[in-house]
Image: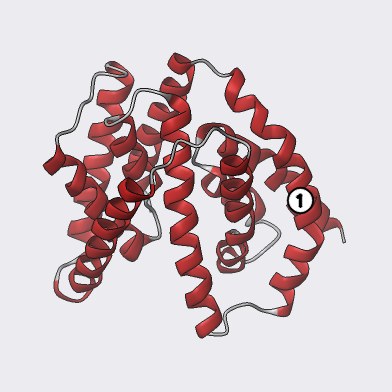
């Protein structure tokens, strides 16, 4: 029972951070809870809080997501994921990993030094969409790339966050389908989800309002640092 209580408390804190800033809940959760649960189990479990964050965040926010824009992001991310699978078999993952970490760190440094100055054209935006998909397929990470793309496209923090939540929600539905097909969900994971879901849903429902209390500059500053630290951490994965 104690590990489940710790799981719920940690996820309530880390995913409250994610519902405010749009990313990093799982990255913050894994190092702490890996002392109590197997990392693979936690990654599978994370689909629950990630979906709760996205559904609650989008439901309790102004309608800013345009389906046509989101569909194009997902289309290019899917193409990137297919390319990532190809690279997985025909290109050294160590080389791709180093390039990816360098690119994310570079974007993070630029965002920290010159917040709000990065502006993407259509080609660079689609390239980042594809890179996000490739990174997701290879390493299970797309947040820093997707957020870099959105920060370079939109000015309003609510728009950036909502598109990020919608993008990750779509990816998580694909993830659930894969888990179901491969019988990945176990009794232990089901118990973890059943115990924590009501508490997380209630916490995230009220945590969502914190997003509207964060000013634009602070939002960009925090997200930029997360991108930078995410890029640096990739060098040590």
Image position, residue 211 (x, y; %): 59, 27
Q: Quadrant of the N terminus?
A: bottom right
Residue situated in front as seen by the camera: 139 or 197: 197
Residue at image location 52% in from the left, 32% down from the top: 21
Residue 12: where, in percent of width, then height? 71, 43
Residue behind mark 1: 8
Q: Is residue 188 above or below residue 164?
A: below
Q: Does residue 150 lie above or below 221 as drawn? A: below
Q: Quadrant of residue 195?
A: bottom right
Q: Position of residue 138 (x, y in %)?
A: 31, 64
Q: Is residue 115 left or right of residue 87?
A: right
Left or right position of 9 against 35: right
Q: Answer with left or right where residue 234 lies relative to residue 19.
A: left
Vertically, is 8 above or below 23? below
Of residue 95 and residue 134, the one placed in the foreground of this image is: 134
Residue at 33% from the left image edge and 65% from the top image edge: 137
Residue occupying the point 86% across, 56% down: 2
| Farthest-out residue, left | 123
Characterize the local packing of mark 1: few (<14), some (14-19) or many (20 or more) Cα atoms within 10 angstroms: some
Q: Residue furthest right?
A: 1
Local SS, label 1: helix
Could you say where residue 159 lies in the image, as x and y percent from the top left? 43, 32
């Amino acid at each position: 029972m104690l590990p489940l209580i710790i799981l719920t408390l940690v996820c309530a804190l880390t995913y409250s951070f994610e519902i405010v800033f749009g990313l990093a809940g799982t990255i913050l959760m894994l190092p702490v809870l890996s002392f109590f649960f197997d990392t693979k189990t936690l990654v599978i479990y994370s689909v629950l809080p990630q979906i709760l964050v996205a559904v609650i965040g989008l439901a309790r926010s102004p309608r800013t997501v345009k389906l046509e824009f989101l569909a194009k992001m997902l289309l290019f991310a899917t193409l990137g994921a297919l390319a990532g699978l190809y690279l997985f078999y025909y290109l050294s993952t160590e080389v791709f990993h180093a390039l990816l970490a360098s690119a994310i760190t570079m974007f993070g440094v630029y965002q920290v030094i010159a917040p709000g100055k990065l502006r993407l054209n259509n080609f660079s935006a689609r390239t980042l969409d594809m890179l996000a998909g490739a990174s997701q397929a290879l390493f299970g990470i797309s947040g820093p790339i997707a957020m870099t793309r959105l920060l370079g496209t939109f000015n309003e923090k609510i728009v950036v966050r909502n598109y990020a939540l919608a993008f990750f929600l779509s990816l998580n539905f694909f993830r659930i389908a894969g888990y179901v097909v491969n019988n990945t969900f176990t009794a232990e994971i089901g118990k973890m989800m059943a115990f924590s879901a009501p508490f997380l849903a209630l916490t995230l429902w009220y945590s969502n309002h914190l997003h509207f209390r964060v000013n634009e500059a602070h939002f960009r500053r925090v997200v930029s640092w997360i991108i930078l630290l995410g890029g640096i951490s990739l060098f040590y994965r």
